[in-house]
Amino acid sequence: MPEHFLFWVGIILGALLALWLIIHLILGVRYIPHSRVGIVEKLWSKRGSLEEGRIIALNGEAGIQAVPLRGGLHFGYPMWQYSINHVPLVTIGEGRLGYVYARDGGALQPVQTLARAAPCNAFQDAVAFLKNGGQRGRQRAILREGVYAVNTALFVVITERAVYSANHQKEELQQFSAWQLELETLRAFTPVRVGYNRLSASSDEPPALPSPVDSGISAQDNIGVVTVQDGPTLDPGEFIAPQVGTKADGNSGHNYFQDIEAFLALEGRRGRQLQVLTDGTYFINRWFATVELKPKTLIPIGYVGVIISYYGQSGEDLTGNLFRYGEQVDVGNRGVWKQALAPGKYALNPYALKVELVPTVNFVLRWISGQTEMHRYDEALASIPIITADAYEPLLPLSLVLHIDYQKAPRVVQRFGDVKRLISQTLDPILTAYFRDVAQSSSMLELLTHREQIQKHATAELGRRFLEYDINCVAVLIGRPESDPRHGQNEDPIERLFDQLRQRRLAEEQKETFGKQQEAANRLKELNNAQAEAERQTHLTQTKIEIEIASNRGAAQLAEAENLALREVKLAEGQSRAAVLLGQGEASRISQVGQAEASVSEQKVRAVGDPRLYALNLVATQLAQSRQPLVPERLVVLGGGGGAGPGGGEGPLAPQASLFHTLLSVLTAWQATQQVQAEDGSPPPPTVAVVPVPPDSRKSTPPEPEPHPAYGTVPASVQKPVKPVLLKTV
């Protein structure tokens, strides 16, 4: 059983081998996968070998055939006559470029760098390429994204990821790898992007261009400067290729260097091109042209751009014969353009045109050591060393305000080249010499105190001089002079002078202050007087008011007093009238009684015969009826002349005689009073009692009798015999 099995297995294998031999050796059936291409090499042919210098067979010669095999079954390629090499399809990614090198074709011309483009269906029709004049070498045409069935035995395709080639020698492979590295360095496998936002670009994009300092240009504001590597060379003396193919509709005719054949047909020249690429994406063969990104030209507000052109024909001078500082030409000619560019962004080729910014607004230049404005025109300027008439050697800081007419900006550039040379070669020497002359004729104190006059004179004089150079001098400003530190002085003489000025100024201020204080004191005195007068006026007014009040009060009191007095007078009159009436009644009664008693007394006195005896009898009766002892415990001696006896009399009976004498005097006085009463009608005086005066009182002078309010003074005739007595109203 095993022997039969092995027998049949051998028969089957032999049949299969015979079948395979029949298919491949006799029928020549070949299978090509759809992801590959079959490169056919004919081992021998009845037509002989290839022509000298050819490596691709077009007419069935032995060698590599021009037509490759695509995916599928193919008949007629027996193994004993054909060798088929399977190679992958050429794949180019999206947004990528592929570069082609042809190993066969016509030879390049001496002036050619790249082979001309021949119709060949993107290098997939090798027969058409060779028959339509295709040339060997690096091709001008490129492959865009996609998959291509390319005969890599004829065309070597270099992409970013691989080098597609077949049946090549080691040296050739090394050359292809070098080209791939070079193209990768140039970032040639990606299209040219101008004005592209690098922030959103992938990692394989070139880095963003640095933005110029303070230019206002962003990383997207750029242009592409093109340098062509193929075509006719430039004329002698030229280094910028002129723009070609520009039409009225704006089409360049060669699609911005993407249509190489059209560019060369328009007589485009190799070298750096005047025409630049603006914002957009361009699929340019980097073997044909390289692109350098440059920032756009920005002319900020407050400036104009004077164009200096390095290309073009020599134009006619527009400045006239009187201006001998260069020529100005029309736009497009070589030289300084007469028309300056207004503020804005411009896509200017920096290798063909140079833009000099000229400020048209007022700008400041500082001749101050260590200070520089933002425009940096004055970065090389410093304070001016001067020598004054009184041998001071300070450093004078200055500031100059200038203005340039925008229409004269090309003349300034034509005369000086740029604004910095204008400042360093003209303004600086003129300004320095002028202020040194001013310092030699002025003292240091005058520089400090007459600064305003010096500034005005300098502005007028320098303005007149600068007009010759198309510059307007707006103002000259002088700073504080400073001592030169190179002299190495221990004490700053300028500071010492400032101290003297400060002291002088302080003294003047003090004088003025004292004057103001004196004036203030006088004003204060006047104020105090005015205040005192105001206060006195207030007091006076108050006093007047009080006087009026007092007058009114006095008038009221007077009226009240008058009324009271009138009432008192009326009361007194009433009382007096009543007293008179009472007195009259009493007097009438007493008169009647007195008359009766007088009548009785007269009768008694007539009966006695002597009035004195009658009076003595009355006294004796009164003494007998008195409750007091006849002889008092204490004796009071009244009146009388002095004597040796008791009581001051002359004898023992002197006191009694004096007593009787006093009684008689009283009676006499009473009688006199009665007479006075009878004469003036006044009421009788009150009854008085006689009181003896103490002995000690006799030494004093007897007082003068005061007049009685009602009765007046007792007559002197009556008072003389009366001794001093103390009267007591009973």
Image (tube, rainbow, N blue to C red):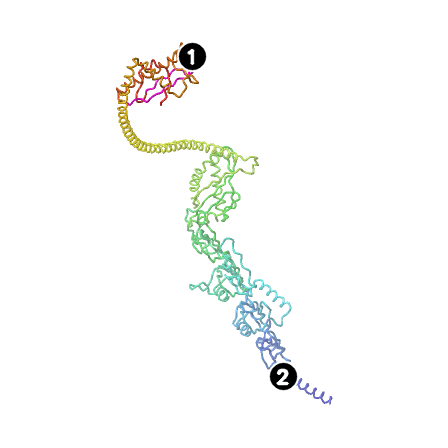
Residue assigned mark 1: 646
Taking the image as shown, residue 611 lies to the left or right of residue 274, namely left
Q: How many angstroms separate mark 1 from mark 2 (CA)? A: 218 Å
Q: Is residue 353 left or right of residue 584?
A: right
Q: Earlier in the sequence, mark 1 or mark 2?
A: 2
Amino acid on which disc 1 is placed: Pro
Q: Nearer the viewer, residue 88 or 246?
A: 88
In the displayed structure, 725 sits above or below 284; it is above
Whether 126 is drawn above or below 235: the answer is below
What type is the residue that disc 2 sits on? Ile
Residue occupying the far front of the picture: 607
Residue 700 covered by magenta stretch: yes
In magenta segment, residue 625: no
Q: Quadrant of the N terminus?
A: bottom right
Which residue position holds label 2?
23
Q: Position of residue 700 (x, y in %)?
A: 40, 15
Front one among 190 and 19: 190
The label nearer to you, 1 versus 2, is 1
Q: Residues within 10 Å of mark 2 (few under 14, many from 20)?
A: some
x, y percent for residue 136 = 57, 69
Q: Secondary structure at mark 2?
A: helix
Tell me the quarter of the picture where residue 557 sits. Answer: top left
- Residue 649 in the image: x percent, y percent? 40, 11
Q: Quadrant of residue 32?
A: bottom right
- Number of numbered discs: 2
Main secondary-structure element of the magenta-colored stretch:
loop
Write the start and end of the magenta stretch as one range: 682-707
484 sits to left or right of 174 = left
Relative image position of residue 643 (x, y in whole percent): 41, 10
